[in-house]
Structures are given as C-alpha cells and as structure tokens.
Amino acid sequence: MRALVQRVTFARVKVAGETVGEIGNGLLILLGVGNGDTEKEAEFVADKCANLRIFEDDAGKMNLSLLDTGGEALVISQFTLYGDASHGRRPSFSPAAPPELAEPLYLKFVELMKNAGVPVATGRFRAEMAVELCNDGPVTIMVESR
C-alpha cells in the first residue's frame, strides 16, 4: 500500500463539478492499493499517516502529528501511484490491485483513520475526480507498507 501524504491548509475533491469532500488544515492522502495488500498493510499505513510528525511545533520543528494538531484528512483512491514507467512511455498499472480488491482496503483505511480520531473526508472510489489543494510548506511524503 502506498500513501502520498501532503500537508495542506485546505483540500477539496469534486466529482462532476460537485464537491464531495473538503478539509481545512490537515493531510491530503492519495492512497494506492497494490496486489497482495491486506488489512495488515492498511493498518500500518493508517497508523503511520495519523502519527506522522510533519506539523510544526512552537519552535518551528516538524514534531507534531495529525492527531496532535487536531487536523483532518482527505483520502483519495489513487491506483496510479502504482504506475510503472520504467519501460517504454506508457505506464503499466499491473502492480495495482484490481478494484474489487482495492475498494475494501481503501474503505478499511478510511475506517482505521476515523477510529484513530481523525476527521476524514473522501473522494468517490473509481470516479473521475478533480482535487484542489494548497500544499503547506510544501511538505509531501511517501508512506509505503513494504
């Protein structure tokens, strides 16, 4: 499982022009599920995202987590995080889990984040989405289960 985590001052996702998820300060998490991923990977990545210390403390050091700051998360499914462009010019997405396996793990990740105490907004699985954000810092971190 891969999560591209961006610290944001706001983020919003639209489907067909309609806002379906929106947050203020927090994390935009683009989540990719790979072949062979299980709930164990979802647990690892959710825990890492909720506790990742990438928010500044009073001394200006990245020392606080999403849970410490009371921030929100916008979680967007993103199979293209498994795109492999090492051969040719058209990426292969075969390392990504098929939708029928990926969706339950995406939903499990969202549930785990909520259970950790993080307010979570989401996009719509398998929909064409437009994501707007203001990357704060900018701070962007890749979290992987393997």
Image (cartoon, grey):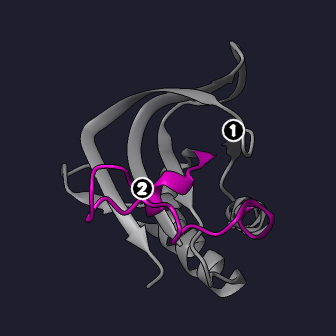
- Residue 35 placement (x, y as % from top left): 60, 78
**Residue 46 on the magenta span:** no
Q: Nearer the viewer, residue 95 or 9?
A: 95
Left or right? Give the position of 85 relative to 129: left
In the image, residue 24 sits, relative to residue 114, either above or below, namely above
> Around disc 1, counting alpha carbons within 10 Å, would you say few (fewer than 14), some (14 to 19), or many (20 or more)?
many
Write down the quadrant of residue 32 in the picture.
Answer: bottom right
**Residue 99 on the magenta span:** yes
Q: Pointer 2 and pointer 1: residues touching (CB < 8 Å)?
A: no
Q: Residue at x 70, y 42 (%)?
A: 122
Q: Amino acid at mark 2?
A: Leu
* Residue 53 shows in the view: no
Which portion, as a residue range, is magenta?
A: 74-102
* Residue 44 shows in the view: yes
| Mark 2, residue position | 4
Q: Amino acid at mark 1?
A: Gly
Q: Nearer the viewer, residue 68 or 137?
A: 137
Image mark for residue 123: 1
Local SS, label 1: loop
Residue lying at the far front in this picture: please name it.
88
Local SS, label 2: strand
Q: Quadrant of the C terminus?
A: bottom left
Q: Nearer the viewer, residue 43 or 54?
A: 43
- Residue 9 placement (x, y as % from top left): 42, 31
- Residue 127 placement (x, y as % from top left): 71, 36
Q: Residue at x 19, y 49 (%)?
A: 60
Q: Residue at x 60, y 81 (%)?
A: 41
Write down the quadrant of residue 101 in the picture.
Answer: bottom right
